[in-house]
Image (cartoon, coloured by chain):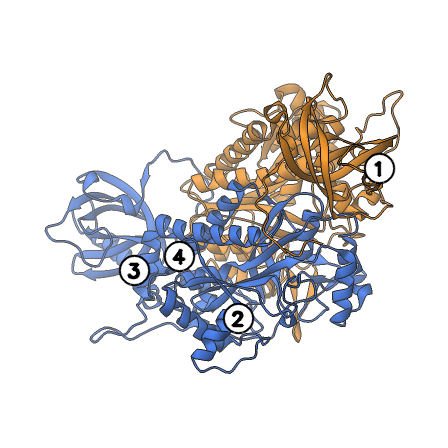
Chain colours: A orange, B blue
Amino acid sequence: MNQSQEKLERSVLRVGDLGTSVIDKKVWARGRLHTSRAKGKQCFFLLRQQQSTVQCLLAVSESTSKAFVKFVAGITKESVIDVEGIVRSVPQKIEGATQQDVELHVTQVWVISAAEPRLPLQIEDASRPEEEKEGELAIRVNQETRLDNRVLDLRTPTNQAIFRIQAAVCRLFREALDQRKFVEIHTPKIISAASEGGANVFTVSYFKGSAYLAQSPQLYKQMAIAADFEKVYTIGAVFRAEDSNTHRHLTEFVGLDLEMAFHSHYHEVLDTIGVVLTEVFRGLQKDCMQEIATVNRQFPSEPFTFLDPPLRLEFPEAVEMLRQAGEQIGDEDDLSTPMEKLLGRLVKAKYDTDFYILDKYPLAVRPFYTMPDPNNKKYSNSYDIFMRGEEIMSGAQRIHDPEYLSERAKHHGIDLSKIKAYIDSFRYGCPPHAGGGIGMERVAMLFLGLDNIRKTSMFPRDPKRITP
Amino acid sequence: MNQSQEKLERSVLRVGDLGTSVIDKKVWARGRLHTSRAKGKQCFFLLRQQQSTVQCLLAVSESTSKAFVKFVAGITKESVIDVEGIVRSVPQKIEGATQQDVELHVTQVWVISAAEPRLPLQIEDASRPEEEKEGELAIRVNQETRLDNRVLDLRTPTNQAIFRIQAAVCRLFREALDQRKFVEIHTPKIISAASEGGANVFTVSYFKGSAYLAQSPQLYKQMAIAADFEKVYTIGAVFRAEDSNTHRHLTEFVGLDLEMAFHSHYHEVLDTIGVVLTEVFRGLQKDCMQEIATVNRQFPSEPFTFLDPPLRLEFPEAVEMLRQAGEQIGDEDDLSTPMEKLLGRLVKAKYDTDFYILDKYPLAVRPFYTMPDPNNKKYSNSYDIFMRGEEIMSGAQRIHDPEYLSERAKHHGIDLSKIKAYIDSFRYGCPPHAGGGIGMERVAMLFLGLDNIRKTSMFPRDPKRITP
């Protein structure tokens, strides 16, 4: 067991760097024993490091005993091993490895950390493309088994790629906002009052009293605006105690939240959100080309399309498109999930984009703090944003006047005493502002065309799962 | 009230940009009415936007009625206003404003959002330097009043600066790690079992059962290592149900956490952590010079010093220094908080650094998962990191072997059934690894030499405060 006994000056190469440039060199590499087979006096094995594999050959010789070959052949799959060997070119490409031009003629093998002999899932099974092909093994690993054994499941090339893409979503989002002088803030998750009337909120024991988990950083973002930060964003955990067991709901997810003061019109904010998301998509296609291809090999999907500047529709236009497609929907009805999906297909057919903004929702279906449309009292200054026909963000111009906010809350039947702190935040002057909250896992899922949000949450939480 | 009635094409200048370059131009600016005084037919007021202020002058004239001057003189302090005026040079510098070379001869004023006439605290009082000077007002705003009225308190130049510095800490930390190919991950805050035996953990009602709030992302970072991500970091909320009402404890704070697989020795990781933090400090001094100066004007402190590479001491050396200074401490005792402070002063005197790493803590004072020192069973491969004599990070090489981990847990009297999931994470091979968790608010507080962590948490949480 490595207890940091000594500092080795040994240079260790990455498996992905083993190629024709190091032919005939003796090198060290560390990785996992992916597969192995013994064949008489020889043992072939694949050494895997993240998304790369190299074929290794150990043969009985003057310096290698038969017992040693047998020992190596007995190393359990997924064990972490150090391998020393000479890089040799091969007469024909090795189909089964990512390093196809070379193999490693092994001189030493050390077991760094042994895996148990029985694995609850096989990495090869978990990596197999969804589509079944004739003559190929039909073994797949179901989602529950994957999630129960996430430490193994995450080792597949697809998962290695997905979580790098997820990291890029956050990085690109931040870069786009930093560039526009947004300030990153951190908002508390433990709050004293349930923000939107107390439904769907988790309760926490807090010393001798109790508290809640924030369903959104909205109040705090708005306070930062009232405190003159002008443009803020925050990335963090958001909690929803909704008993929804669907492909797109989690009880805990990562929110990409932003809020921005504007001068004359909330479209200043909406345009910014549109540009920021467009930059994220373009950045992903540029920086994560290889990762996207890796995911597509296992889970094929159409490439994600978007327009620049993004398409913005108004709610009545959407209603009209749905009616023309045969749907029955009232002017002030909210869209059902199937209608959203259908609208996504109609928009894609008409405008060739998987990404669009739907502006001007009916006032009746939005929360009390939403600013009504000044020109038509049926509508509001609010918007949802969609990717492949699924909602990834909801947002609005917020009411920044405490008296009008109280009036709207009363109209919604909300007990004013419970939202006093919220209303009081606007008593000392607050610029008009708008913002929204984006579900990070949804962006990753829909960008990649995946079918379940649990594929883009490293350790997903839903009403039935809080482990591992 | 702005309901986004129209899109104004008006170009609005920032108060900070009003200077000699726009002399005699007619401009619009938006800001807060900072102070005002009427004087006969004139009204002088200061317009403030974030950290900048400009003097404005409104006088009765052909186009400006007496009633209008009176109206403007009556606008409440902290109201958000739009001002149109002509930029004029002034014969002598205006001491009371940041824009000292010009004043605005006002032609129009619009109230965008009025503040209530009685403010619970005055921005000027909240902005006044700590040190009392003869002949100056002695009014200060105490911390509870500040935190109760955070929306006002955060408007001071110092707070505007502090939270920009805080954002820079996170940005610089991420940049340093991204550059070294760390992958950003997101770990769940809702967990099924209390990570370290169940003390100091908040309980959450979770549908029909219950769950806990994560005291650290450590288990999940380690699972990401066991899942081959090699180098990971995460920035997010960390929860501690400790009933500590001190200047440096919060019940919810932002953790800058990282974990990294290494080849032969945990110093590979410790060196990385040292370099990363050094880059953060250097970046702050470069990018936030102005903000640091602003904070120092209100809360003076010595500039933060650090060595490159950072100083690394071993625990026995620290014990020796403390003994020479007259302290009584056993070889395997942990450091008390006063001893840490004293050690900070001794190190500063001897090495001229406010930042150092203390390596090789006694095994007896560290958690069960800490890897023992291979050469001396009294010590361990673990470390704390200090800024100005206060701990900002704790970390270690973790035991990556499930059998040895079980043995150490038993030795600590821990019920193995409660940490089964943790131990099982290492059953399928795991490279040796080390890491640590840094308290973001502590880094900001100690870098700036502030006296209370509530100054660097935007909405602090402690046993007695969960509002606003």
Tag 1 subunit: A
> Given the current orientation, which residue lies at the most extreme front position?
A62
Of badges 3 and 2, nearer the viewer stands: 2
Crowding around mark 1 (Cα neighbors within 10 Å: few <14, some 14 to 19, many 20+) is: some
For disc 4, the chain is B
Q: Is residue A224 left or right of residue B262?
A: left
Q: Quadrant of the N terminus of chain A?
A: bottom right
Sequence-earlier tag: 4 or 3: 3
Secondary structure found at label 3 = loop
Which mark's residue is nearer the viewer, 1 or 3? Answer: 1
For residue B324, which quarter of the picture? bottom left
Q: Residue sitting at 51 percent across and 50 percent down?
A: A399
Q: Which residue is mark 4?
A: B307
Are dots 3 and 2 on a single chain?
A: yes
Residue A11 placement (x, y as % from top left):
58, 40
Label 4: element kind? loop
Which residue is labeled 3 in the image?
B74
Position of A18 relative to B372 (above/below): above
Q: Is residue B333 left or right of residue A300?
A: left
**Disc on res. A160:** none
**Alpha-carbon span between mark 4 and mark 3:** 55 Å
Residue at the extreme top of the image, as rendered: A91
Do dots 4 and 2 share one subunit? yes
Query: In the rendered structure, are the residues bearing label 4 and label 1 in contact, judged by CB atoms less than 8 Å apart?
Result: no
Tell me the residue that label 1 is attached to.
A66
Which of the two marks, 4 or 3, is nearer to us in this view? 4
Q: Which-is-in-front pick, marks 4 and 2?
A: 2
